[in-house]
Amino acid sequence: MPMTSARPSVVALAALLAVASVLMAGGAAVDAARVKDLLPDLQMAPIYGVQLQSKNGDLRLRFGTLVNNIGDGPVIVRGSGPVGSKMTRVVQRIRRTTGRARGVLQPQATMYFESVGVHGHWHLRDFVTMRLISLSTANPSPDRVSTKIGFCFYDTTRLAPDDRPPNSARRTFTGCGHADSTRVRMGISVGWGDAYEPSYQFQAIDVSRLKSGLYRLCSTVNPQRLWLEKSAANNSSWVDLRFNAARKTIEIVGSETSPC
């Protein structure tokens, strides 16, 4: 009886394994393509509570701001490795459709401990900027900025039912650490906002010796585009004010949620 070679069978098996490997790799590529970041969408709500305050001979423009998150996932910022009053490592954590998260190092971000007044917790510098811009073309005044530059942000205000995204989450973030914290986690859940009332410390712009005229008060979240989010189109809100220096009065003449 003639002997038959086993080589064709080995070749066929190798071919099948190669095909299976290609199919598995293709499937893995498809699965990887389906994994997406659940990015936040930071929305600056309309500025509210605009008022003038006279104190100790100074005149301050006070107002309230509210930053909402209407995105696919929470905005999460973590700080670690404190040296003195600053965290040496600041990372944005981004949730993914797999249920896990990835970290994005933000070396340009500054997280620091604020001990002045009622704070006593960690702040993220320039998360929101507030600026008073002169609209007078004949004799414009220099821009003035808020004395508040650092923000501890967490879930303070839930959006109204009609404004909440369908993926709105429960309240998750409740604080910003303390003096002894070696790790700090702050953020805003989907369907929640972080409010700063007009009466809060540093929530003001000094308008002493400001000329009478027309001004735009502009509030912008994520102004340096450090934090990854779905869209930056809704990051600013503004009100136009007519300021009378002699009478120390203001009049709101316009407002909009749009780039300033």
Image: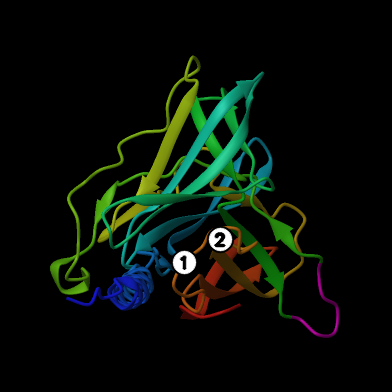
Picture disc at residue 222: 2
Residue 153 image-quadrant placement? top left
Colour scheme in the image?
rainbow
Where disc 1 sits, the SS reads loop
Vertical arrangement, residue 208 with respect to residue 160, above or below: above
In the image, farthest residue toward the right: 139
Q: Position of residue 170 (x, y in %)?
A: 17, 50
| Disc 2, SS | loop
Horizontal side, residue 78 vs residue 114: left or right: left
Q: Is residue 118 visible?
A: no
Q: Residue furthest bottom?
A: 137
Residue drawn at 32 percent across, 51 percent down: 100
Q: Which residues are magenta?
A: 136-141
The image quarter in which residue 246 lies: bottom right
Query: Quick one: label 1 or label 2, which is nearer the N terminus?
Result: 2
Residue 217 is labelled as none
| Residue 56: image location, x then y, percent | 65, 35
Residue 55: where, in percent of width, then height?
60, 39
Indicate the amino acid at tag 2. Asn
Whether the magenta-drawn stretch holds residue 218 is answered as no
- Quarter in which the C terminus is drawn: bottom right
- Asked whether the viewer can see residue 219, the reply is yes
Residue lying furthest front: 1
Residue visible at 57% across and 79% down in the picture: 259
Pointer 1 with pointer 2, Cβ within 8 A: yes
Q: Which residue is mark 1?
A: 229
